[in-house]
Image: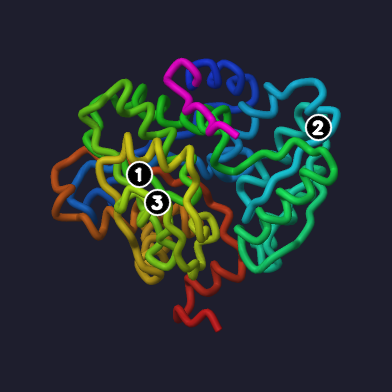
Amino acid sequence: MNPPIPPDLSDVLEARKRIAPFLPRTPFRRYPSLESELGCQVFVKHENHNPTGAFKVRGGIALVSKLQPHEKKSGVISASTGNHGQSIAHAGSLFGVKTTIVVPEAANPTKIAAIRTLGAEVIHRGVDFDEARQHVEELSREKGYRYIHSANEPLLIAGVATYALEMLEAEPDLDTVLVPVGGGSGAAGCGLVMKALAPRVQVIGVQAAGAPAAYLSWKEGQAKEAGCSTFAEGLATRASFELTQGMLREHLDDFVLVGEEELRGAILLYLEKTGALAEGAGAAPLAAAVKLRERLQSKKVGLVLSGGNLSLEKLRWVLGSGNSE
């Protein structure tokens, strides 16, 4: 099978027209107390304000709205740790498409409840995202469902890239954007837009040190697998993906890793300085900004708060001693 063709800027602009009737722009706000902490101008892109609490819904609507009639009739299936599943379920409810989402056994219960509320069937399978994904591929072949990959989908990437358009339109003279990387759709889309419209902007990807597959693949220039041990389920994958990885290599200026305590500290910092609730992946760019504080001095920095779907259990852990046992 030939690899999918990466989207371009025209695909992003077309995707924005399709999602505009369903999604308002999300805020892109400054917080003086956060700026004082970091020593630079900071603009937070609040993708946690989307209907599903995360940026992925943009891609779900962009893709499902363009399915062929036979694909809509057969239904769609996808693997997810939560936010991608919500996005596909939400789009399925908008366009009358039967949706099945396979999630890991220990998936975030808040996200799983939301997927079910949106009308999707949820199947628990596997210890992590990659095992869930393998089961999806089997079911897709057996049942004839349209398999929606969480990363290797040009229409999905074009849809999520629309948040980067909004960032540039609101603040055209950004210097740096920090964006989380799990499967890589959000970072790939952000890099595409920034390099097409404002190539001076430095785009920095951020991944959990406990799940560094995309980072290692980007750094070494070839697909790598790695361990997966992080509380940030949006960053938790053992593998990199062909389409997004190619785009990351083309468009990212740098890639950094952050530890579990750095992610936890960033969630607390968002709560303290902005009142915003960020999940682990959503807090990763702020964690990186703290780590890169000296490099970012006096810069105009955009942070992508990609999602705010933190479970109560993990919120209690973040607010507590840090002992997850």
Kindly identify which residue carries mark 3.
274
Q: Which portion, as a residue range, is magenta?
A: 1-11
Residue 97: mark in rendering:
2
Mark positioned earlier in the residue sequence (3 or 1): 3
Q: Position of residue 16 (x, y in %)?
A: 53, 20
Position of the N terminus, as image quadrant, is top right
Closer to viewer: mark 3 or mark 2:
2
Q: Are marks 3 and 2 in contact (CB under 8 Å)?
A: no
Mark positioned earlier in the residue sequence (3 or 2): 2
> Residue 226 versus residue 89: which sits nearer the camera?
226
Q: Position of residue 131 (x, y in %)?
A: 65, 61
Residue 303: mark in rendering:
1
Q: What residue is at 29 percent from the left and 39 percent from the top?
A: 203
On the picture, is 266 further left or further right than 106? left
Residue 149's place in the image compared with 314, above or below, is above
SS type, badge 3: helix
